[in-house]
Image: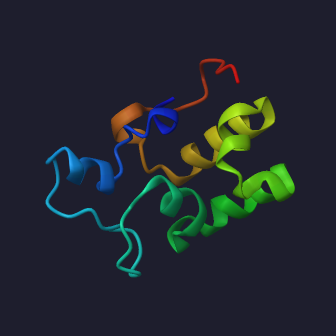
């Protein structure tokens, strides 16, 4: 799971390894770096998908540790990522393989 290693195709990481020129999110107008935290918890572009994740995981929806380590959290995180379509071109559809927590 690329989110665990922090080596994920978000602009902040891609900028750090010199693949893209800017680390900023191109999906919102906040001028924020597109980090894992921004993508999962802050970017307004993914608000609808995030609300589904919040309904599924409740107060744990803002805990990266829960989303990465608990089976219910991982499942919800995979649904969120797939719903955004943000990585479909890079990783394809996520969650088809059973990820263990």
> What residue sits 60% from the left and 23% below the top?
96
In this view, the residue in front, 82 or 64, is 64
> What residue sits 36% from the left and 51% below the top?
10
32 relative to 63 in the view: left or right: left
Residue 34 vertical position relative to residue 60 in the rendered view, above or below: below
Q: How many marks?
A: 0
In this view, the residue in front, 82 or 65, is 65
Residue 3: x and y, percent? 50, 39
Residue 34: x and y, percent? 38, 61
* Image quadrant in which you'd find residue 17: top left
Residue 32: x and y, percent? 38, 73
49 relative to 19 in the view: left or right: right
Residue 67 vertical position relative to residue 39 in the rendered view, above or below: above
| Location of the C terminus (image quadrant) | top right
* Image quadrant in which you'd find residue 75: top right
In this view, the residue in front, 57 or 81, is 57
Residue 70: x and y, percent? 77, 33
Q: What colouring method underlies this structural image?
A: rainbow
Asked if residue 76 shows in the view, the reply is no
> What residue sits 52% from the left and 34% below the top?
4
Asked if residue 21 shows in the view, the reply is yes
> What residue sits 51% from the left and 69% below the top?
43
Residue 40 vertical position relative to residue 18 in the rendered view, above or below: below
């Amino acid at each position: 799971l690329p989110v665990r290693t922090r080596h994920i195709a978000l602009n902040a990481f891609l900028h750090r390894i010199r693949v893209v020129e800017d680390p900023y999110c191109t999906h919102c107008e906040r001028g924020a770096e597109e980090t894992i935290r921004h993508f999962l918890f802050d970017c307004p572009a993914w608000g609808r998908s995030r609300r589904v994740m919040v309904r599924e995981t409740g107060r744990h929806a803002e805990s990266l540790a829960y989303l990465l380590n608990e089976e219910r959290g991982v499942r919800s995180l995979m649904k969120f990522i797939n719903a955004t379509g943000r990585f479909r071109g890079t990783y394809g559809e996520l969650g088809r393989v059973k990820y263990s927590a």
